[in-house]
Amino acid sequence: MQFLQAVTPSARTQDASGTANLLTWSAYVSFLPIGIANVLLGPMLPALSARWSLNYSEAGALFTDQYIAATVAVALSGLVVSFRGFRFGIKFGLILTAASLAFLFTGPKTLGIICIAGLGAGLGIAVPAANLLVAEANPARRGARLNWLNFCWSAGAVASPFLVAAAVKAHHILLFLALLSACCLLVAAGFALMPPSVVEPPVATHPRVEVIPVIRSRLMSFLFLAAVFFIYVGTENGFGGWVASYSKTLGTLSPAISLITPSFFYASLMLGRVLAPALLRIVNEVTLVRAGLVLACAGTGGLMLSHGLAGVLVSACTAGVGLSCVYPISIGMLSTEFGPAATQIASLMFVLSNIGGALLPWIVGIAGTRFGTLQAGLFVPLLGSAAMFLLYLRKWEPGRRARSLAADGISRMGESSE
């Protein structure tokens, strides 16, 4: 009897570890098709523009359609997870994504726009749910597990343009979308068919902080970071979403080669994030961001002046490496500047970043239509990179006063709850 009592805690620990690993690996698998679908609109844009006879402005509005839907879905994802759990959020998001992919290329433009919005909404629910699941299932190794999760997303994003190019070259776009839809459904089914013994972790509840005094105490930092978040995602989408269409307009690249150019951008984005920890041992975060944004300006300017494959690929890789560290370091700056209030302020920043992701690629299209060339539209991500560089020229100092106010806010809320 004593032997059984001694073994039971160990067995429970092993069971909990096995459940956490199963949930984590399932989330990893889900992020491969999610990564493919997340950046699909960019390489698909030439085919969709040809099918629906879109000008640059109308094509750019498709990004707005996707990201507005994603913004609303991200705002709702917290409620979905709170009431139904992490796995339900992932399943629901994947099923909505699968349905949107299946019908995207089958009907008129109106149906296509609805599907693009559905795609954004599905991803907006599934992505936060998967990130939260991995974070809560691995409290001791949260950072490492989340890094691998987003590496899987990056792998899908890099593969997406190659898969689209192969489908276009073989005239099997419908088959490709159907297979990607089926993959999403299979992953959703895997989550649904998990045995009852697999119990997901409870949704964590964190003490809320009175953020208004914190924001007032660090108002300039708040405004600067809000601008960075708004501009960054729009700049990344403006470059990555339009590079395939721009390459096609050069007339020197085959359609298949044009469609794979975003892969080099996303691959270099991923590589830069892998190398960033080593670089941060040599230089500080702000210096690394400044250097990266100089590279991003050079890469975008180089793309605008490119006339052949070599120039396009070198420019795409340069811009990707340059932008790679901006977003992760900016997220880290939230904690530095706002302390315990960073989590709540981050929610607002993520909404702003999605709004930027919706608007700036559309402005690329508007400028391309107005001036008759996408070269003019690419001034938008170029100006975005330059603006972020100027924002990061300010002197950044840790927000001690903000952290103090946040701590006071937590203390007051604790007292009021008692």
Image (cartoon, helix red, strand yellow):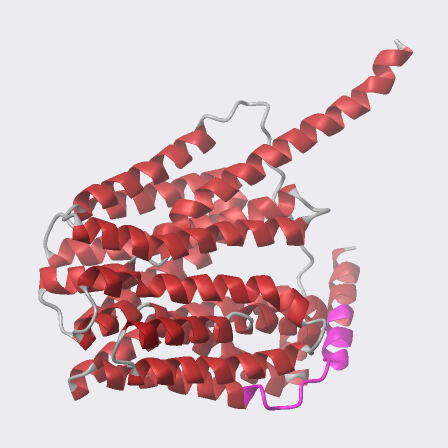
Give whichever of 235, 139 is nearer the camera: 235
Give whichever of 13, 303 is nearer the camera: 303
Residue 85 in sight here:
no
Q: Quadrant of the N terminus?
A: top right
In percent of width and height, residue 388 lies at 50, 84
What residue is rendered at 40% in x and 56% in y?
A: 157
| 262 to 133, vertically: above or below | below
**Residue 64 in the figure: left or right of residue 15:** left
What residue is rendered at 24% in x and 44% in y?
A: 176
**Residue 43 in the figure: left or right of residue 337:** left
In percent of width and height, residue 375 lies at 25, 83
Report if residue 406 lies within the magenta region: yes
**Residue 21 in the figure: left or right of residue 324:** right
In percent of width and height, residue 217 lies at 68, 84
Q: Residue furthest right?
A: 2
Q: Which residues are magenta?
A: 391-407
| Quarter residue 92 falls in | top left
| Quarter residue 284 falls in | bottom right
Give whichever of 75, 314 is nearer the camera: 314
Q: Residue furthest top?
A: 1
Report if residue 192 lies within the magenta region: no
In percent of width and height, residue 382 lies at 38, 84
What residue is rendered at 66% in x and 54% in y?
A: 143
| 33 to 65, vertically: above or below | above
Residue 76 in sight here:
yes
What residue is rendered at 17% in x and 86% in y?
A: 370
